[in-house]
Image (cartoon, grey):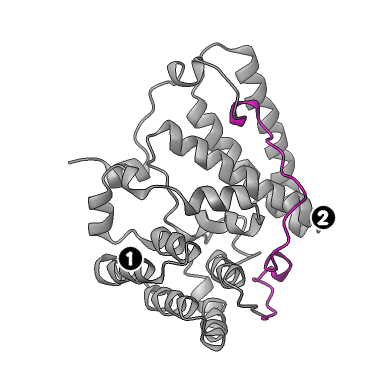
């Protein structure tokens, strides 16, 4: 596996290549390019946080990661509303803009919403409702997750910790976070084998950050929990890093130049029967 520094260097090179490709070609798969840039932004976040200890750049990277996901979501008719915990890591950016965009997103616009609910893919909905301070709806979607989502090693703790956050039970939250941070549980994370796995726990960090956003100050020291990202401390400003993400950017080719791509894992899950 590449070191973080090596991965960062490769990522910068790939980023330049993708942006040059957009500049020099009239036909390109903008969705694929945005997806690749998003993956690279995650690597940049890890590098700026763990190698440079640069909190400002780290939060900028997380902001851009979510802006790219918003863009991809718009291109694909809202298929990509975050439902997995690692996709909710953007909360650590402290950007009021993207947190508000997530909070105010209309979930009824999601294709195959009924199917997603039937399968229990509702963790993102729970977090959205917690941010909206609608505990009743948060508990409604949490109950759907408990009833419909397939069993996995940490499912019962997902339910317990979200319930504790809703009820503002700090002691229970901290007790459950320590369970996520146990090596035996962390090693069963979906991120195992990824560059980030030995650096942080996405699950523990997202839940701890959500607690902070709700005014519950979590104080746990652990190598897998980046405590510097937990207090609410936004950058003075956030930069739109790519032209195609700018609000007034007009390019008819954005849609018309999309090349046909094969269905990915996500599409196969939620594709209409």
Q: Is residue 143 above or below residue 111?
A: below
Closer to viewer: mark 1 or mark 2: 1
Which of 181/251 is in front? 251
Q: What element carries label 2?
A: loop
Instruction: State which region is magenta.
Output: 219-246
> Main SS type for the magenta part?
loop
Q: Residue at horizontal 35%, vertical 66%? A: 137
Mark yes or no: residue 15 visible: yes
Q: In this view, does 10 lie above or below 4?
A: above
Q: Distance between the residues labelled 1 and 2?
A: 39 Å
**Could you tell me residue 105's position as x and y percent?**
44, 48
Task: Kindly identify which numbered label has been placed on residue 141.
Answer: 1
231 in magenta: yes
Mark 2 Cα-neighbour bin, 10 Å: few <14, some 14–19, many ≥20: few
Determine crowd level at label 1: few under 14, some 14-19, many 20+ residues with C-alpha closer than 10 A: many
Mark yes or no: residue 3 visible: no
Instruction: Indicate left or right for 265 with 127 as reference.
Output: left
- Residue 190 at what x, y percent from top left? 47, 61
Q: Is 59 situated above or below 181?
A: above
């Amino acid at each position: 596996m590449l070191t973080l520094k090596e991965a960062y260097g490769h990522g910068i090179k790939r980023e330049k290549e993708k942006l040059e490709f957009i500049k020099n070609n009239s036909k390109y798969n903008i969705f694929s390019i945005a997806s690749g840039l998003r993956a690279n932004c995650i690597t940049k976040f890890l590098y700026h946080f763990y190698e440079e200890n640069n909190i400002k750049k780290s939060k900028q990277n997380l902001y851009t990661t979510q802006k790219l996901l918003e863009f991809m979501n718009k291109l694909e008719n809202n298929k990509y509303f975050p439902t997995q915990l690692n996709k909710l890591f953007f909360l650590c950016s402290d950007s009021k803009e993207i947190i508000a965009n997530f909070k105010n997103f209309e979930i009824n616009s999601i294709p195959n919403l009924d199917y997603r609910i039937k399968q229990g893919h509702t963790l993102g909905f729970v977090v959205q409702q917690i941010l909206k301070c609608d505990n009743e709806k948060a508990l409604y979607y949490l109950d759907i997750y408990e009833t419909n989502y397939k069993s996995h090693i940490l499912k019962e703790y997902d339910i317990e910790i979200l319930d504790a956050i809703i009820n503002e039970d700090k002691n229970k939250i901290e007790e459950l976070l320590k369970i996520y941070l146990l090596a035996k549980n962390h090693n069963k994370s979906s991120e195992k084998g990824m560059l980030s796995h030995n650096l942080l726990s996405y699950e523990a960090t997202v839940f701890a950050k959500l607690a902070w956003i709700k005014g519950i100050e979590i104080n746990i020291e652990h190598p897998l929990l980046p405590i510097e990202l937990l207090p609410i401390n936004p950058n003075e400003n956030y930069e739109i890093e790519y032209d195609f993400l700018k609000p007034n950017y007009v390019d008819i080719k954005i849609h018309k130049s999309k090349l046909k791509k094969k269905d990915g894992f996500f599409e196969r899950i939620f594709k209409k029967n």
